[in-house]
Image (cartoon, rainbow, N blue to C red):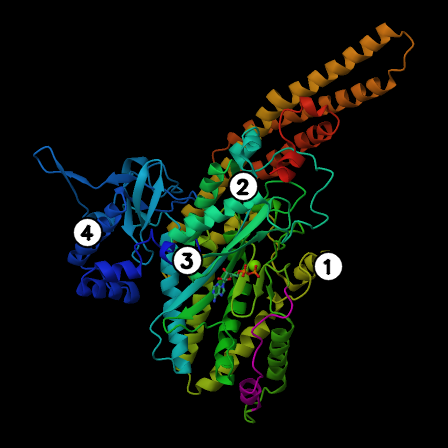
Amino acid sequence: MSEKLTDLFGSDVFNEATMIERLPKKTYAALKRTLENGEDLDPAVADVVANAMKDWAVERGATHYTHWFQPLTGITAEKHDSFINPTGDGKVLLEFSGKELIKGEPDASSFPSGGLRATFEARGYTAWDCTSPAFLREDAAGVTLCIPTAFCSYTGEALDNKTPLLRSMEAISTQAVRVLKFFGHDDVKSVSASVGPEQEYFIVDREKYLKRDDLIFTGRTLFGAMPPKGQELEDHYFGSIKERIASYMKEINIELWKLGVSSKTQHNEVAPAQHELAPIYDSANVATDRNQLVMDTMRKVANRHGLACLLHEKPFAGVNGSGKHNNWSLVTNTGKNILDPGNTPHENVQFLLFLAAVVKAVDIHADLLRVSAANPGNDHRLGANEAPPAIISIFLGDQLQDVVTQLVENGEATNSKEGGKLRIGVTTLPSLPKDATDRNRTSPFAFTGNKFEFRMVASSASIASPNTILNAITADVLCEFADVLEKSSDVEVAIQDLIINALKEHKKVIFNGNGYAEEWIAEAAKRGLPNIKSMVESIPALVTDKAIKLFEKHKILSSVELHSRAEIMYESYAKAINIEARTAISMASVKFIPAVISYTKNLADSINAVKTAVADADVSVQTSLLKETSTLLVKAQAALKALIIATEKANAFEEATESAKYFRDVVVPAMSNLRAPIDALEVIVDKKLWPVPTYGDLLFEV
Ligand code: ADP
Ligand code: MG
């Protein structure tokens, strides 16, 4: 296997090596100019590329191609077309034109548009994203050539996650290049946001999974008492990997390697049955596409192994949930990582300016980062002492913090710049730490040596939105910095001022302590940091004047697009909770309550039978169990009725906002009220009668 790995890797990708091999030199050069400088692609070039792509795909068994896109459902969509073209003599040719490569037109009327598109103008267009390589996918339908595309409406509004991400990458590239000029980097033509997303997931047995409607319909358990053993022993974290899981992971790796995804590390996570996969980083755009492939592959391969992969943020109450650690940095086209502090004072200053920009951006736009991590699942996780709190703060680590403190304080001490003290103060800084000595796991946004790790990101969601926002907010501050520098007569002093002022004004967002501690919540409030507790509360951040100004200035999203996205988020929250509520209602009505009734009948029968056999026998155990069970049954039935009423009411609202709020405020608590008596009953009722696999069965019997 290991000898063949080099052949296997990327074998299903129309990557650079394949293009060099298969495209005429001139075509490849033209495509490269488009890739690197964003030049328009000549239709004649597109024809040649399309033909080479088709030949390559057909040699590998492909019969169809698809424009693979990422509508605002958070998952991927595709519409398959075959390469077949009739020749008129009853035969066919396999053809694929540049036009078909570049543009597709799926009927888009049933994808979320947040009111952007009425069904009578349902046209949607997909446009080839040549920066993300095409790949082959094999399944029961055969082999399909998948072409990553952006998806927009007839009027040009973005209807997907990729379009704003690509626009944000352009924005950060433009602004970072402007700033880098002041450090003598005239050779830097572009800067790319690099992203390495670590993916957490749970694996359970498929047969057990199929017995739980809640897992099937909602991705999480809506009921379930804690087993005698949870994660308290912490014996699962980095523990040895079970045979069945190991063979699952092995197959995932092979599938991903074929797709050119450099799945690199794998280990058990904190919770039982929880695992993590980390790839090597890519450009934000490619990393986003590949993370979709990772999630897709995890689900698909699980089926083949009689397993089910749960990507939900909180599949089990009482044990840790899953997230994605979104490692983010900025890399120049000359291969330099801008967030690497470097070894020389000169590099230090450049690093500090970018660091200051990120600190400022995160402080000003904490609300946007928060909404980028919001989904119904993350409401159970953020702030629940297992994941970062819902408060955005930055962890720098002791050494870097010390540098920042010095800067901020020296800045104050040497207001008079005549002495040049300030300048010297910065340029003679010691070589900055490459590795944060202390690995603080409680911070939502941590500097980890040469990148930032945004740890709030939802495990099941696309990473497009968090990265779009990271790019956008950083680009905006860099733009402001570049404006100042371009007007300045003493650039060195201007740079020092920018660093010190940004750090001084925004140091309140830096926090190196324990993010899980109660005191932090109070302290953060004192500092004026927002604590946005739920998805519904986070959504307005998308449409503040501040956000609209930011996104419009950098041409990432228009006001109309932002409003439509907010609307879609409200709708998707309401839909998700509605499905949860209906599933809970159904499980309680047709599974749990009937099971409990059977159990009470068994108890009653037992009491009668024992009494008949021995008139004065002691039946106090059965009697007390029967009373206890019946009391809980009454509670469950009342809670069930209340949930039914609440759900009906939540669905009656016209406005998505109102509906979402009602779901959060009334339906979610009503679901908890139903869960409580059912979970209490689970530990009383005869296990043979319990209609679904328990937490113990799911978490420990894989
Ligand atoms: P952790 O210790 O946080 O679990 P891992 O090694 O599992 O770290 O994951 C670190 C991730 O960060 C990997 O995906 C890695 O490729 C990514 N990474 C490393 N350097 C960069 C960078 N410059 N930009 C973006 N991501 C990076
Ligand atoms: Mg990590």
**Horizontal arrangement in the rendering, residue 139 relative to residue 264 (left or right):** left
Residue 546 visible, this angle: no
Quarter occupied by residue 193: bottom left
Label 4, label 2: how far apart the Cα atoms are: 39 Å
Callout 3 secondary element: loop
Counting from the top left corner in percent of width and height, residue 684 is at: 75, 26
Label 4, label 1: how far apart the Cα atoms are: 62 Å
Looking at the image, tell me whether mark 4 or mark 3 is earlier in sequence order.
3
Relative to 101, say whether 420 is above or below: below
Q: Which mark is residue 3?
A: 3
666 magenta-colored: no
Q: Residue at x 25, y 62 (%)?
A: 20
Q: Residue furthest bottom?
A: 419
Label 3, label 2: how far apart the Cα atoms are: 32 Å
| Three-letter amino acid code of the residue under disc 1 | Glu
Looking at the image, tell me whether mark 2 or mark 1 is earlier in sequence order.
2
Pick the residue in front: 92 or 408: 92
- Residue tagged 2: 310
426 magenta-colored: yes
Q: Residue at x 90, y 12 (%)?
A: 617
- Residue tagged 4: 51
Counting from the top left corner in percent of width and height, residue 161 is at: 40, 50
Q: Residue at x 79, y 23 (%)?
A: 628
Looking at the image, tell me whether mark 4 or mark 2 is earlier in sequence order.
4
- Foreground mark, 1 or 3, reads 3
Q: Residue furthest left?
A: 89
Provide the residue span drawn in magenta: 421-439
- Residue tagged 1: 519
Callout 4 secondary element: helix
Label 2, label 1: how far apart the Cα atoms are: 33 Å
